[in-house]
């Protein structure tokens, strides 16, 4: 038993672990800072919650690093059914937060099921596409994988949570590209996406969702109302300079000019308080995370592990890219958190589980092949 633990931790990717811990630390520092300006200094509720979730997340990371990822693969159908039931249950019994019925509340803590459904979808699609690795990819495979994805995305849209639904579809797109489907299928996706967007614009999107897209095109056109968030984020980022104003001294975040400072726009808080150098450090830790995971893909000789790593990388990268793009005003605001950094226990726990599974794949690649 001791030798097993010794081998496990010897092959553990501690550099990847360090990158994750440092990203979480940046988040905790800025969540604490935002709490100073929101009058939470006496209890620091959000900081304490995030700290608890960080500790639980580290435990889950180590736990899942011991769980054979082939065992998770064997459960892929059951996990998918569980994910569907979770999304249905939250529509019926869930609480509404900021217009989205997507949370369960337990003793003061909120749980957002869609964050864990993202993991389930990666496992399910990684299994589906790994079974096709040596086969010719047909229209049937394309439609079936799309249908499984759209069932989950559709349930998420009913909450409504456009940002999370977009991530689920993006995971599918990344994995069908990795599965090497014919290029004609991507042309079909483009046409269908354009038609669906047109339909959604006139018959599905709420006014605030249309305004977000219009503000993305020209945020200055309504900077005091619907374009306020983007305008304040851009001001925050621009005011940070090289070294920033210091933790707890960011005027936009401390004086509450910047909405959702600890969630959607925490990147703007980092830029304002830690400056360009702080932003570079955060991006470096993300790069280190991506590099450590990407380098192991060529060492894994089973298709499920490869597809899971690609899906995990895609999920983290897309959420990071969209969140930073939102803060810079180059992408519409869709309510996506900055991975490992933004306030949110469900997102942090799900990401730590993913990193735990990634660690198991890394360890197996060093000890089994």
Image (cartoon, helix red, strand yellow):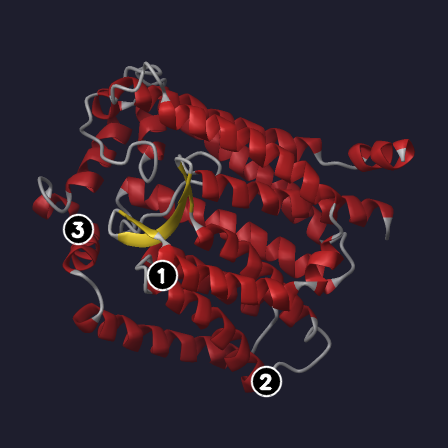
Number of labels in the image equals: 3
Identify the secondary structure beneath mark 3.
helix
Q: Label 3 vs label 1: CA separation?
A: 33 Å
Foreground mark, 1 or 2, reads 1
Tag 2 or tag 1, which sits nearer the N-term?
A: 1
Let me know if residue 23 appears in the view.
no
Q: Residue at x 75, y 58 (%)?
A: 70
Q: Residue at x 42, y 64 (%)?
A: 88
What residue is pinned by disc 1? Answer: 92
What residue is pinned by disc 2? Answer: 138
What residue is pinned by disc 3? Answer: 215
Identify the secondary structure beneath mark 1.
helix
The reply to whether the C-beta atoms of the residues labelled 3 and 2 are less than 8 Å apart is no
Q: Label 1 vs label 2: CA separation?
A: 37 Å
- Coordinates of residue 306 in the picture (x, y in percent): 68, 58
In the picture shown, does residue 233 fall above or below 77? above
Label 1 crowding class (10 Å Cα cut-off): few <14, some 14-19, many 20+? few
Tag 1 or tag 3, which sits nearer the N-term?
A: 1
């Amino acid at each position: 038993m001791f030798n097993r633990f010794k081998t496990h931790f010897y092959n553990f990717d501690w550099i990847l672990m360090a990158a994750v811990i440092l990203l979480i630390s940046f988040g905790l520092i800025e969540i604490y800072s935002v709490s100073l300006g929101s009058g939470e200094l006496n209890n620091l509720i959000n900081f304490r919650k995030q700290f608890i979730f960080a500790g639980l997340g580290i435990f889950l990371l180590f736990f899942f690093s011991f769980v054979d990822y082939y065992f998770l693969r064997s459960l892929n159908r059951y996990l998918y059914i569980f994910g569907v039931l979770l999304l249905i249950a939250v529509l019926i019994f869930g609480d509404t937060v900021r217009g989205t019925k997507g949370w369960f509340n337990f003793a003061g803590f909120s749980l957002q099921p869609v964050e864990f459904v993202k993991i389930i979808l990666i496992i399910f699609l990684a299994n589906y596409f790994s079974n096709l690795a040596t086969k010719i990819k047909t229209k049937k495979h394309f439609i079936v994988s799309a249908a499984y994805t759209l069932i989950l995305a559709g349930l998420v849209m009913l909450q409504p949570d456009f940002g999370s639904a977009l991530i689920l579809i993006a995971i599918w797109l990344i994995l069908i590209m990795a599965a090497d489907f014919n290029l004609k299928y991507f042309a079909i996706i483009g046409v269908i996406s354009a038609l669906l967007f047109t339909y959604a614009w006139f018959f599905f999107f709420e006014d605030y969702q249309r305004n977000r897209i219009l503000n993305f095109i020209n945020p200055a056109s309504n900077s005091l109302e619907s374009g306020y968030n983007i305008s304040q984020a851009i001001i925050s980022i621009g005011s940070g300079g090289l070294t920033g104003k210091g933790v707890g001294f960011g005027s936009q975040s401390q004086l509450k000019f910047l909405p959702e400072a600890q969630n959607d726009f925490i990147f703007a808080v980092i830029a304002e308080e830690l400056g360009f150098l702080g932003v570079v450090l955060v991006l470096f830790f993300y790069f280190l995370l991506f590099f450590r995971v990407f380098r192991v893909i060529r060492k894994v000789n089973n298709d499920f592990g490869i597809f899971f790593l690609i899906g995990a990388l895609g999920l983290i990268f897309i959420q990071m890219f969209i969140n930073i793009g939102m803060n810079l005003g180059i992408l519409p605001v869709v309510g996506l958190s900055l991975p490992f950094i933004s306030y949110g226990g469900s997102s942090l726990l799900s990401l730590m589980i993913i990193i735990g599974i990634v660690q198991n794949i890394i360890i197996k690649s060093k000890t089994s092949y």
